[in-house]
Image (cartoon, rainbow, N blue to C red):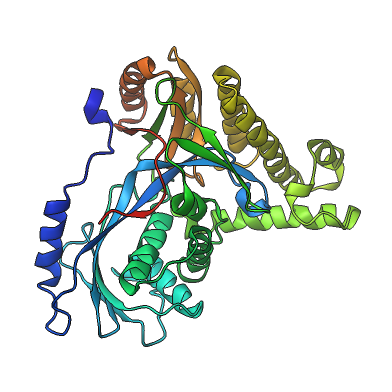
Amino acid sequence: MEGPAATAATTPDLVAMKQHFVSTFGAPPADNPSARLHVIRAPGRVNLIGEHTDYNDGFVCPMAIEPQVLVICRSRTDGLVRLASTAFPGRVAELSINQKIQRIDAGPEKWTNYSRGIAAELLAAGIPLTGMDALIENTLPVGGGLSSSAAIEVGTGLALLTLSGESIDPMRLALLSQKAEHEYARVPVGLMDQMIIATARQGHATLFDCRSHSRQFIPIDPNELRVVIVNSMVKHELSGGEYAERRRQCEEGVRFFHQQNPAVKALRDVTPKQVEEARAGLDPTIFRRCRHVVTENARTCEFGILLTQRRYEQAGQLMVHSHNSLRDDYQVSTPELDYLSEQAMTVKGVYGARMTGGGFGGCVVALAQPRSVDPLLAHLDQTYHARFNIHPTPYVTTATAGASVLE
């Protein structure tokens, strides 16, 4: 793990990808000989703070990152959508936009549910689509908490829209992509991932109100801050039930507080004081879940203020408090994530570190001074390997723009 090699966000070789596309799908079909190749980019995302608050109508502070999903695509006139991925060489999945799009429950084509879902939702929204051939390349770790699924949804959606000569508001694309994940991947995610991937601003994180959908852009100055993401290489599967269970527990908490005050519609409407006062009346597990969400909302709003004011030490401490709450109250961390977060904070110039994403594996994120990046990466590689016999994978990134048509 050294210097430039530690930055896993590299410039894609579009020439090689286009050649791969042609080798997979062949020349343009005879009935559409002028069909040109388009390149769509959908970034991954990292959430700086505000975890498991989005589906509670709360606040989050994510940013788009350099690791990404690329979709090389070409239109078809027969309504057929053919999907291939560089992760699964030699496999091509097919579906038709002229028929009801089915979800795949098992087997090697299950990954296509993200693309199938957004195609189905665009059609259900009354948007006319054309068929397409699409090759997807993903430099995001699957199950790493950097939102590869949402990037595939948004990227596929933008590809279909582009080839069909259609355009919609990016936030609408985010909402349709969220619905696709609900219906086809069967994961009840909040809106954060799709929102930031579709709407991010270059050089900024976004403080997002998941209820009103209002956004505040928070500058991330690369001369002062580096965002370091470290993959623990412990993978998770959110559809395995833990994510849905946490959401159910939050809903149980809402019912308790709603009985006391009908104005409470989500944990967003509950204060830290009210949670503490309800300790005796709540199941201990439900109490801890509620306490995390309510205090995390407060931390996230304060974090946005501190980062804007360049008060990096105080903002970093909120990240540490967030991790501790996710570990102890929400119980979604792992020993690997705990260790990486703790060790990151021992390196001079690191302001804050925490697990990021849904949990049960995945990544930690740290804010650090630029000069501290190399010492941080070297320290984490050495200590983590000594403890777990695993080399973590690092990503050093800046805040990038949302999904776009590159060509």
* Image quarter of the N terminus: top left
Image quadrant in which you'd find residue 237:
bottom left
What residue is rendered at 55% in x and 43% in y? 332
Q: Residue furthest right?
A: 260
Q: How many marks?
A: 0
Residue 6 x %, y %: 27, 29
Image quadrant in which you'd find residue 132:
bottom left
* Image quarter of the C terminus: bottom left
Q: Is residue 101 above or below residue 360?
A: below
What residue is rendered at 63% in x and 49% in y? 214
Q: Is residue 168 above or below residue 243?
A: below
Q: Is residue 320 visible?
A: no
Q: Could you tell whether 3 is left or right of 111 in the image?
A: left
Q: Could you tell whether 392 is left or right of 124 in the image?
A: left
Residue 267 x %, y %: 74, 49
Q: Is residue 143 visible?
A: yes
Report the front residue among 111 and 46.
46
Residue 257 x %, y %: 83, 52
What residue is rendered at 37% in x and 48% in y? 43
